[in-house]
Amino acid sequence: METVSTLSIIGMAFAFIISVGLPIGLLVFVLKKLKANPICFFIGAITFIVSALLLENLFHVVMLHIFGFSLAMNLLIYAIYLGLSAGIFEETGRLIAMKVLMKKTLSKENAVMYGIGHGGCEAIIIVGLTSISNIVTSIMINTGSIGVLLDKLDPTVKDTTIQKLSLLWSTPSYQFYMAGVERISAILLHICLSYLVYKAVKNHKIQLYVVAILIHAAIDAATVLLAHYVPIYVFEMIVLAVVLFISFVIRQKYEGDQMQVV
């Protein structure tokens, strides 16, 4: 069994700090700077769990049962399917949460707080927990302590486990860093989409909700497509650039709004 490089472990730590530290840092900043309601952070987090992890995944299970793996046979169709699924479920969840759960506290500041909760919860669950698990496992591999655990396994299970663990030392170090970069893009995007849906609810403009779905779907679909044709660091930089542009536009709109009392 090989060892995991120091650069890879640092990359895992970077991804963990971004996925956990960035949401917490933004939460504290928005609480102090914008005086937003912290409850909206948790509404965003819970809505993500319900809309994406539960309902969207259930939808995928149903679609897999109906169509089997034929959906994944055509890359373009599969990318559009994944993008639209994420966009529809998450933006609809965002819309319902703002209309129902945030009805009495709906403001642009709280929309930002909601976005931090939504994107932060996603980052912590998808990247944060995985990163800390990878760090602990990598340290156990490098110190040799994992061998004690592996020796207790059935030979077949042991071989399968080692194959899975091999990803930790065979994966290029930079890919672990890219997981952190990807979360920066995702959290910023969720904040922007939350503002769009807030405007859709506040101004009764359903078209902004549709725009939020399309932006979400387009970026997710593009990510799936780009991942098959260019190196991960290239498409992550492209996605980050697009999200930063969207963030710049949304910030201009945000600052143009009349300040609202939470």
Image (cartoon, helix red, strand yellow):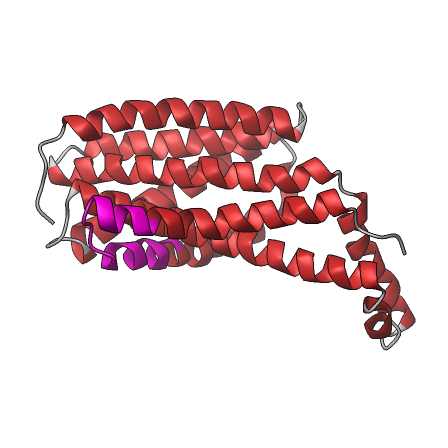
Relative image position of residue 77 (x, y in whole percent): 55, 31
Of the pair 21 and 199, the residue shown nearer to us: 21
Magenta stretch: residue 196 in it? no
Q: Is residue 216 above or below residue 94?
A: above
Q: Is residue 99 left or right of residue 2?
A: left
Q: Is residue 55 above or below residue 68?
A: below
Q: Is residue 52 something that shows in the picture?
A: no
Query: Which residue is farthest bottom?
Result: 152
Q: Is residue 56 above or below residue 151?
A: above
Q: Is residue 226 above or below residue 31?
A: above
Relative image position of residue 208 (x, y in whole percent): 23, 31
Q: Quadrant of the N terminus?
A: bottom right
Magenta stretch: residue 34 in it? yes
User: Which residue is found at the position 72% from the left and 39% from the top?
Assistant: 173
Q: Is residue 215 left or right of residue 123?
A: left
User: Which residue is found at the position 69% from the left and 36% from the top?
Assistant: 174
Relative image position of residue 92 (x, y in whole percent): 30, 45
User: Which residue is found at the position 20% from the left and 30% from the top?
Assistant: 254
Q: Is residue 26 something that shows in the picture?
A: yes
Of the pair 56 and 111, the residue shown nearer to us: 111
Of the pair 55 and 196, the residue shown nearer to us: 196
User: In the figure, residue 204 lies in which quadrant?
Assistant: top left
Of the pair 125 and 184, the residue shown nearer to us: 184
Q: Is residue 13 left or right of residue 159?
A: left
**Segment colored magenta:** 27-48
State whether the magenta stretch is mostly helix, strand or loop. Answer: helix
Relative image position of residue 222 (x, y in whole percent): 52, 27
